[in-house]
């Protein structure tokens, strides 16, 4: 049985001073879903993003991403997990200003052991897929906001990740560019990509098939909650271990 892309059981995150950012969260997202994680500032959605992206660890409970139990992985293995299985898109793009669109996308493969020629060829293909084949040689500062975000999406997808995490992907864009980016996200979902959009915008959330609403560190509503399996499937070998070599084939 294919494991869910995301599975949390009783996940908590606490900080000194009695701050409880997440309170016993149970969440399952299966392969091919498109979900909004929505809530106001301070609701816990950013903390959840950090756990899903393996940028932080839960205080207690279980967090599995792409079938891996995050608590059992070393920092090096977590880096390998991010490089091979998770794509990130952020509000402010994070493109290198002095590099071309192609090189910005190719940089998404730096930690996968891929040679420069192949990185650039795959970057070209990814840019064509997001409608930017004609802007491949343009530097980041020569691109519009919407084009920069599409470059960021291409960079996130070039390695064939199991999960795309989009954190406020339209927050720095005008309405027309934001609509273009959301249309692209819908197209990626239609092509089989699993996407979680983290947002405070209820209009964006309401446009997506599944809406997971957070408040005060808890899920208060989930329009597409799936029943949790009684027993999780066995986790795959840890990233970077002999059973999963660094030259793993891109999916």
Image (spheres, helix red, strand yellow):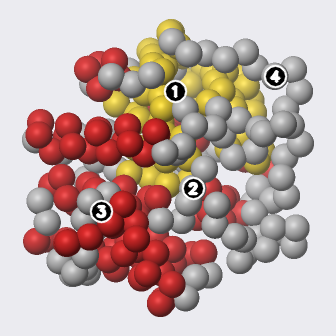
Q: Alpha-carbon distance for marks 2 and 1?
A: 27 Å
Residue drawn at 49 percent across, 55 percent down? 87
Q: Alpha-carbon distance for marks 1 and 3?
A: 32 Å
Report which quarter residue 251 is drawn in.
bottom right
Residue drawn at 18 percent across, 52 percent down? 146
Q: Earlier in the sequence, mark 1 or mark 4?
A: 1
Is 58 displayed left or right of 237 in the figure?
left
Depth order, front residue of 101/218: 101
Residue drawn at 33 percent across, 67 percent down? 127
Residue drawn at 40 percent across, 71 percent down? 125
Q: Which residue is mark 4?
A: 229
Q: Position of residue 182 (x, y in %)?
A: 29, 38
Report which quarter residue 200 is drawn in.
top left
Q: Earlier in the sequence, mark 2 or mark 1?
A: 1
The nearer-to-camera label among 2 and 1 is 2
Looking at the rendered structure, the secondary structure element under dot 2 is loop
Q: Is residue 17 visible?
A: no
Looking at the rendered structure, the secondary structure element under dot 1 is strand
Looking at the rendered structure, the secondary structure element under dot 4 is loop
Q: Earlier in the sequence, mark 3 or mark 4?
A: 3
Q: Position of residue 198 (x, y in %)?
A: 40, 34
Q: Which residue is mark 1?
A: 21
Q: Which residue is mark 2?
A: 161
Q: Position of residue 147 (x, y in %)?
A: 19, 59
The disc label shown at residue 211, or none: none
């Amino acid at each position: 049985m294919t494991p869910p892309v995301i599975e949390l059981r009783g996940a908590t995150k606490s900080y000194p001073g009695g701050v409880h950012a997440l309170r016993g969260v149970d969440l399952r997202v299966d392969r091919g879903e498109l979900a909004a994680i929505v809530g106001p500032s301070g609701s816990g959605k950013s903390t959840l993003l950090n756990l899903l992206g393996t940028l932080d660890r839960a205080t207690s409970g279980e967090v599995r991403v792409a079938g891996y139990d995050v608590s059992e992985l070393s920092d090096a293995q977590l880096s390998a997990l991010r490089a091979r299985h998770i794509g990130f898109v952020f509000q402010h793009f994070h493109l290198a200003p002095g590099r071309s669109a192609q090189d910005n996308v190719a940089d998404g493969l730096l930690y996968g052991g891929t040679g420069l020629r192949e990185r650039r060829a795959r970057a070209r293909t990814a840019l064509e897929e997001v409608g930017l084949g004609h802007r491949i040689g343009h530097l980041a500062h020569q691109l519009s906001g919407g084009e920069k975000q599409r470059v960021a999406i291409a960079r996130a997808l070039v390695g064939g990740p199991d999960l795309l995490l989009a954190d406020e992907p339209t927050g720095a864009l005008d309405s027309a560019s934001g609509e273009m980016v959301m249309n692209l996200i819908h197209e990626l979902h239609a092509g089989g990509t699993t996407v979680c959009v983290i947002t405070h915008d209820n209009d964006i959330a309401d446009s997506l098939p599944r809406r997971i609403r957070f408040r005060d560190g808890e899920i208060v509503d989930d329009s597409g909650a799936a029943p949790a399996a009684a027993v999780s499937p066995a986790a795959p070998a840890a990233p970077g271990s002999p059973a999963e070599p660094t030259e793993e084939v891109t999916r």
